[in-house]
Image (spheres, rainbow, N blue to C red):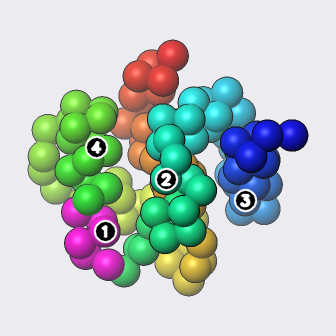
Amino acid sequence: MSKFDEKVAQYSKFMDDKGLDYNADLLKAVTKGLGPSIYKRDAETVSGSDAKELLTVKNNFLIKKLGLEDGPQLDAAIDKVIETIGKSERSKYRAVVYYLLAVEFGKEAIYS
């Protein structure tokens, strides 16, 4: 198994453990879209309590990648995803956060 496939399997297991339904192909596409950052421990995760980190998620992913308009709905969606994963969960994998946000806004087609 390649290192990439190992990461996808890790994120799949994480979502299974959390009881989250997901599309494996979409999760794989989101993971691929993150490039080499998935291999760096710090870049691989999102800190749910770091305002600067959450702003990066909003600007770089929601606005630039998904093409969404800035507004309170973006912050609300990020909060919802963090809550879904669990605020106390230390490993909020970026691939999982981005996957859940893409689904939340119905932007799965970007990864087709």
Find numbered disc 2 in the image and state the secondary structure of the residue it sits on: helix
Of callouts 1 and 2, which one flags the residue occurring earlier in the amino acid sequence? 2
Q: Quadrant of the N terminus?
A: top right
Image: magenta residue range:
50-55
The answer to which image quadrant residue 55 occupies is bottom left
Q: With 6 as the anchor, is 47 left or right in this view?
A: left
Badge 4 element: helix
According to the image, label 2 marks what residue? 37
Query: Residue flagged by tag 1: what amino acid is it?
Result: Glu
- Give amino acid for label 2: Ser
- Identified at 74% across, 46% down, the residue is 3
- Residue 14 circle label: 3
Do the residues bearing badges 4 and 1 touch, measured as CB atoms within 8 Å?
A: no
Q: Indicate yes or no whether the magenta region holds residue 52.
A: yes
Q: Residue at x 31, y 56 (%)?
A: 57
Q: Residues within 10 Å of mark 1 (few under 14, many from 20)?
A: some
Q: Amino acid at mark 4?
A: Leu
Residue topped by disc 4:
62
Magenta: main secondary structure equals: helix
Determine which residue is flagged by label 1.
53
Q: Is residue 40 left or right of residue 61?
A: right
In the figure, 78 relative to 30: above or below?
A: below
